[in-house]
Amino acid sequence: MQDYDEVTAFLGEWGLFQRLIFFLLSASIIPNGFNGMSVVFLAGTPEHHCRVPDTANLSSVWRNHSLPLQLQDGREVPHRCRRYRLATIVNFSALGLEPGRDVDLEQLEQEGCLDGWEFNQDIYLSTIVTEWSLVCEDDWKTPLTTSLFFVGVLLGSFVSGQLSDRFGRKTILFATMAVQTGFSFLQIFSINWEMFTMLFVIVGMGQISNYVVAFILGVCTCFAVGYMLLPLFAYFIRDWRMLLLALTVPGVLCFPLWWFIPESPRWLISQRRFREAEDIIPKSCKNEQCSCPVVVFDPVEELSPVKQQKVFILDLFRTRNIGTITIMFLLLWMLTSVGYFALSLNTPNLHGDAYLNCFFSALIEVPAYITAWLLLRTLPRRYIISGVLFLGGGVLLLIQLVPADYNFLSIGLAMLGKFGITSAFSMLYVFTAELYPTLVRNMAVGVTSMASRVGSIIAPYFVYLGAYNRVLPYILMGSLTVLIGIITLLFPESFGMTLPETLEQMQKMKWFRYGKKTKDSMEKEENPKVLITSF
């Protein structure tokens, strides 16, 4: 077939039809912001302590002293997982002994929460944590719930591309939207944690498949819009089942888009479905007010497909240079993803209003994406990515120095850290695509972005560390972010350079002894100069 872009050049590059499709695809991403971060409220852990049964024959004094104290954030609070042995303090109460005066509380025997827990309902009426008591000995299930969701995202990224090539972009887009919405609805009827988590894995598999339709500025922004709407829903709906029901509604509203979003003409042509591809073009011409040829895709002009050299994942490690770049990119993607998701999931643990903190965490992503787009248009990639990583990691390390009374400053630094890491995260697709040659470019972006899925699986356990030390997650995230900022400076520069076509044309690491092609020498090559300046 003649070059697709040449055949359809009469439509223009960015006409009304293209803008409409772009807007509709972007709108379909909004529910991803709900499902991707809904676990922040669905699995919120409120303040809790052991329940002391009302039937226990205790005086008011002993009931008030039935729980040992523990130190939390510099103050003593009732222990979350222990109580004094109930039979013992009931006996002391019957004898008329008073705690502290007649009985040394530090010498009393303790026991676990045999009668369950009492949960504070000031923030959440109910969550999966309160319903299935995912605290104390079972608190490990909460981060595992989130991690398994991202395992689903990882599994979905494996199969989405192959399914799209086999059944079509449009079909898989709406099929995965149905999976995401349908299984989110089924989660409402979960009878235990195991059922909820298994369904959550499937929801994750559906989410990634329609998110990878396009990773560009508008899509990123629409994800942030959905993320911003999440705390609004959660603020007014404090029961996790009703919240989940409300979050499935926008997904249902996206299904009418089936009649407005066409199948990809490129995919239809690859399947030799020329008539269907022809039917899409006149609609585009009508919107663009251009003249459409009678025959756009002529099967007679089809040529034998160009045989492309087969590539394998090991080609990303064929030489010391490309292998080193691949390993560094894997670290960069994974650790940037850890920072992004750990900061997003940690918003309920910040001081202040959990809903407002979540909203700010989502809101900061919009200027982060816009800033990244502006920087990519004019500045070298290595310096802007490492710069925003140094910014994000540096402010996170400063949080440990903030006095406990200055909560607003801690929140501000956390949001600034999120800004830097989000900016870097959104630029990695461009930087990766520009450095790798055409032969392995798609594979390289796929493999390195896969590392980000691994990072998102690890991220919930960074948040989990905050239960033991409030600033420990920030110290770890800040240190790792600064580290990958340093690693980024070791990459070769891609800004203003010709995109390489072969492994031999790939630029060399800055600190390797053998030579690196200069900008002038690269421009003299036959390959055309191509600059990637958008997502």
Image (cartoon, grey):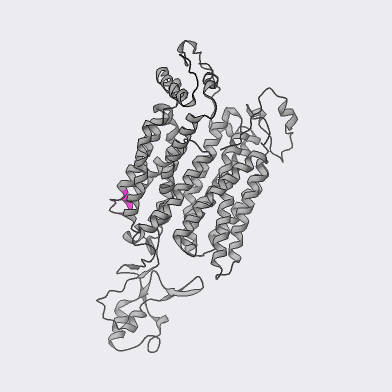
Say whether residue 483 is left or right of residue 473: right
Quadrant location, the C terminus: top right
Q: Is residue 193 magenta?
A: yes
Report whether 499 appears left or right of 134. Answer: right
Q: Is residue 370 left or right of residue 188?
A: right
| Image point (37%, 33%), residue name | 258
Residue 152 in the image: x percent, y percent?
Answer: 41, 43
Q: Would residue 412 appear left or right of 111 to someone viewing this image?
A: right
Q: Residue lying farthest left?
A: 55
Camera-nearest residue between 78 and 377: 377
Report the number of discs.
0
Residue 316 location (% of width, % of height): 58, 34
Depth order, front residue of 34/481? 34
Decide if residue 331 is in sight here: no
Residue located 49% across and 33% down the image: 19
Residue 496 against residue 293 in the figure, above or below: below
| Residue extending furthest toward the top | 300
State the image coordinates of residue 184 (x, y, percent, origin top left). 34, 46
Q: Which residues are magenta?
A: 187-196
**Splitting the image into 4 quarters, where does residue 425 fall?**
top right
Q: Quadrant of residue 46?
A: bottom left
For the point 32% across and 42% down, the residue is 182
Q: Position of residue 263 (x, y in %)?
A: 42, 27
**Would residue 398 be counted in the magenta stretch?**
no
Q: Quick check: can you spot residue 257?
A: yes
- Residue 273, placed above or below residue 28: above
Query: Of 456 and 261, which appears nearest the observer?
Result: 261
